[in-house]
Image (tube, rainbow, N blue to C red):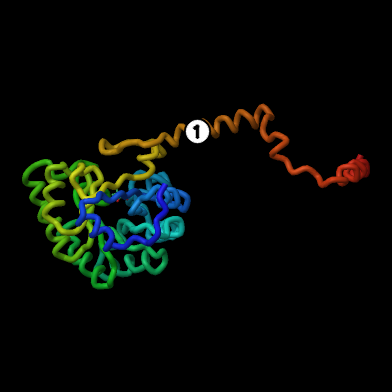
């Protein structure tokens, strides 16, 4: 465990790219997980709209609202005061207009104190990215597999696996950097393409399922600790099996409640010294 002395900023992330030090990034949706991640030495936290599936049990990220994101960002910010925390702009918080995008991004900063916001899309959202940057907010682009528009992609499919598709990704990445975004996330992209983009761009380029050559790696915490059960993407590595640990613990609790072995004497608050004799008298009144 590492104790971090100062709060990380975008400049620290640039410096890490500069010296070739990989950036560690994971999602978090609540206060305890944020605390654990900061204690583990994580540089970045994403309060992803994946909270729709991981916390609320929705089938996709589409139903997630700004209000839900703000509540979870606020909790994560408190749990990880020195980590670079990013809010993920949910579906329909930025698609309709530049103004709405700026208002939504601003809420993340004003109401939850995040360090940056992320929005999905390349050239088609360049106007939104510029508008949010003009409001003085740090922006992370997100291209490749973009879950909010997975319907247009024909499902949750890796992107950039043909030369034509790789070219589109490269053009998107260049446009995002040119617009002034400070970070870029590549999701489900071949390592060959991700490595090229990482070397070509001067901003930190992070990977979720985009191979080892990016400047850092992101995982969804519920996948990484074995909490989310519905499906596991190819790029996930499980570092723990929390579902098994928690289910076993709860099954043990059920067993002990039924057998009466919980609670034991050490879990009880006994009456104060001298009160038990008086209590016997009290009971007699109700006999
Ligand atoms: O919501 C999220 O966690 C994300 C990742 C899938 C990149 O956007």
Is residue 29 visible in the rendered image? The answer is no
Give the percent coordinates (x, y) of residue 106: 34, 68
Query: Residue 222 appears in which quarter of the rendering?
Result: top left
Q: Residue at x 37, y 64 (%)?
A: 108
Give the percent coordinates (x, y) of residue 16: 24, 55
Q: Residue at x 46, y 32 (%)?
A: 244
Compared to residue 11, the image places residue 227 above or below, namely above
Q: Nearer the viewer, residue 1 or 257?
A: 1
The residue tagged with tag 1: helix, strand or loop? helix
Compared to residue 203, the image places residue 214 above or below, namely above
Q: Residue at x 29, y 68 (%)?
A: 137
Q: Nearer the viewer, residue 269 or 141?
A: 269
Give the percent coordinates (x, y) of residue 54: 39, 45
Q: Residue at x 30, y 49 (%)?
A: 24
Compared to residue 36, the image places residue 6 above or below, namely below
Query: How many numbered marks are there?
Result: 1
Query: Residue 210 appears in which quarter of the rendering?
Result: top left
Q: Could you tell whether 267 is left or right of 39 in the image? A: right
Quadrant position of the C terminus in the picture: top right
Q: Nearer the viewer, residue 53 or 44?
A: 44
Q: Could you tell whether 125 is left or right of 102 in the image? A: left
Q: Mark 1 = which residue?
A: 247
Could you classify mark 1 by the number of other residues whose Cα lies within 10 Å: few (under 14), some (14-19), or many (20 or more)? Answer: few
Query: Residue 255 appears in which quarter of the rendering?
Result: top right
Is residue 268 visible in the rendered image? The answer is yes
| Residue placed furthest toward the bottom | 135
């Amino acid at each position: 465990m590492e104790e971090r002395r100062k709060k990380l900023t975008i400049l620290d992330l640039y410096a890490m790219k500069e010296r070739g030090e990989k950036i560690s990034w994971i999602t978090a949706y609540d206060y305890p997980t944020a605390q654990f991640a900061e204690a583990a030495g994580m540089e970045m936290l994403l309060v992803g709209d994946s909270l729709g599936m991981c916390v609320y049990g929705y089938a996709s990220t589409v139903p997630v609202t700004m209000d839900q994101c703000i509540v979870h960002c606020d909790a994560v910010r408190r749990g990880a005061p020195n980590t670079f925390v990013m809010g993920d702009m949910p579906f329909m918080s930025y698609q309709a207009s530049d103004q709405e995008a700026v208002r939504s991004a601003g809420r993340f900063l004003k109401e939850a104190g995040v360090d940056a916001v992320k929005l999905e899309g390349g050239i088609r959202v360049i106007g939104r990215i510029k508008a949010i940057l003009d409001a003085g907010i740090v922006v992370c682009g997100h291209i490749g597999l973009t879950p909010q528009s997975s319907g247009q992609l024909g499902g949750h499919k890796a992107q950039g696996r043909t030369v034509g598709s790789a070219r589109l990704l490269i053009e998107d990445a260049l446009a995002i950097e040119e617009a002034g975004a400070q970070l870029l996330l590549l999701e489900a992209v071949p390592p060959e393409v991700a490595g090229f983009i990482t070397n070509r761009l001067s901003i930190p380029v992070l990977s979720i399922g985009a191979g080892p050559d990016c400047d850092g790696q992101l995982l969804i915490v519920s996948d990484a600790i074995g909490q989310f059960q519905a499906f596991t993407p190819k790029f996930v590595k499980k570092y723990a099996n929390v579902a098994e640990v928690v289910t076993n613990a709860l099954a043990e609790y059920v067993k002990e409640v039924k057998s009466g072995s919980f609670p034991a004497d050490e879990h009880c608050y006994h009456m104060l010294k001298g009160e038990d004799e008086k209590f016997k008298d009290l009971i007699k009144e109700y006999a």
